[in-house]
Amino acid sequence: MAGRIEDYALIGDMQTAALVCRDGSVDWLCLPRFDSHAIFAGLLGTEEHGFWRVAPAGPGDGEPAPADRRRYRGDSLILESEWDTPRGTVRVTDFMPPRDGAPQLVRIVEGVSGRVPMRSALRMRFSYGRIVPWVHKVGDRTVAVAGPDSVWLDTEAETHGEDLTTYSEFTVGPGERVALTISWQPSHKDQPALPDPEGALEATADFWREWVDHCTYHGPYREAVVRSLITLKALTYAPTGGIVAAPTTSLPEEIGGVRNWDYRYTWLRDAAITLSSMLRTGYREEARAWRDWLLRAVAGDPENLQIMYGIAGERELGEAELDWLPGYENSGPVRVGNGAANQLQLDVYGEVTEALHLAHMTGLSRNDYASLLQLKLIEYLEKNWNQPDEGIWEVRGPRRHFVHSKVMAWVAVDRTIKLIESGDADGPLERWRELRDEIHRDVCEKGYDKERNTFTQSYGSKELDASLLLIPQMGFLPPD
């Protein structure tokens, strides 16, 4: 059974990510991309749907013990878990090297004290736990093959198969290290190069050290800020600059509920806010890459702007249900794809324009098409800002006049006016100033409950909405 979601730690290589539980089990991993099929889907079902546990060998078939300590090594995505056992202490180091060839997940077991018996249990199930692969030996390597995918296990430890699972038992003493690595490769290609776990560990540590060195933030809670930035970087798909909202699908909004969505895509809203954080802390290269991704994704069709795209800019994100998976804590259905891609969410125009504005203000090199795109977005809003939409919460039902959407439409117009006033774009300045004032009046008249002295979720509604706390932050009204 899967662990609690708060017991999972993230590791990744900026193209995909794995979730490692406190008991040493990897219960979620999609290869080779964030949005590929999972080879470990135990997070959304049981161990029958795929997992890889490396931990001290326990007596019998009892529940595996959680690690006594766990931490990231410095400012990195290298995860270290330590167990104190009656026979000694052992450390497992888990990481995914930034990709240079085949994607890899590396697990290095190191004895700290005493002599600790260890056990690796690897159960690969392709296509989100549905397909049992053909597992066989190729020389000293173990390979699992199903359809277009192959996953190669390399380790110096002896392995054997039992109950459609690959096991390995070994013992480590002080300073002894045993590495286990899996590598993904298209099944029609030659086997991937043999991994170098220790060299990959050093290169991964160097990568994160150098990346964090570019951070310009030195204020309060810097350690927490840097950890957040590392996590955001881990959710960036390096080849394109797209940013996933999360590396998982179908974790429920509430246990037992049905609002279980696939978040392995790039929401323009989430990505724009992420890029704002990156720009404010010195990471211009990530901002430039995302701006280029945005321009490719939107292409010449800004009037049909989607709220989300695939990580390479794909537009078709058809939604389907995986009925063989029971879901996290039996919260079904499990979904892949996202039917909300074609919803109308007018606030997205504001978030994208705000990100482009911030990039311009922080000195990101000028891109004439980005400025043209911004003008095209306002031309669309000029005709459509007063339409009802699905809003930030992606309500699946009748469209409404969401106050947050209107405020963000105002933001889009306001930031574009500033772009024109700076002399970096041409547009109907006076007409858009009048539009900005019109949207402002409309929100204050129709989105405000005078009796309760509060803005409401939508026009005529009594519901409150936390997203409206952004009103002062966006400059729509002063904080008081």
Image: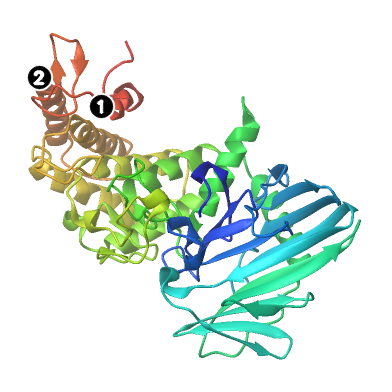
Outermost residue to the front: 60
Image check: 336 left or right of 214?
left
Q: Is residue 295 visible?
A: yes
Callout 2: helix, strand or loop?
helix
Q: Position of residue 138 (x, y in %)?
A: 67, 90
Q: Residues within 10 Å of mark 2 (few under 14, many from 20)?
A: few
Give how far apart the Cα atoms at labels 2 and 1 are. 17 Å
Q: Tag 2: residue type?
A: Glu
Q: Quadrant location of residue 314?
A: bottom left
Q: Is residue 37 visible?
A: no
Q: Nearer the viewer, residue 293 or 158?
A: 158
Callout 1: helix, strand or loop?
loop
Q: Nearer the viewer, residue 61 or 265?
A: 61
User: Residue drawn at (82%, 58%), measured in percent from left and top?
Assistant: 110
Q: Tag 1: residue type?
A: Asp
Q: Quadrant location of residue 432?
A: top left
Q: Residues within 10 Å of mark 1 (few under 14, many from 20)?
A: some
User: Residue drawn at (40%, 41%), measured in percent from left and top?
Assistant: 273
Q: Position of residue 166 (x, y in %)?
A: 64, 75
Image check: 209 left or right of 417?
right
Q: Quadrant of the C terminus?
A: top left
Does residue 159 lie above or below 286 as drawn?
below
Q: Where is mark 1, residue-wise?
A: 465
Residue 445 - label: 2
Q: Quadrant location of residue 300?
A: bottom left
Q: Position of residue 310 (x, y in %)?
A: 35, 62
Q: Nearer the viewer, residue 82 or 408?
A: 82
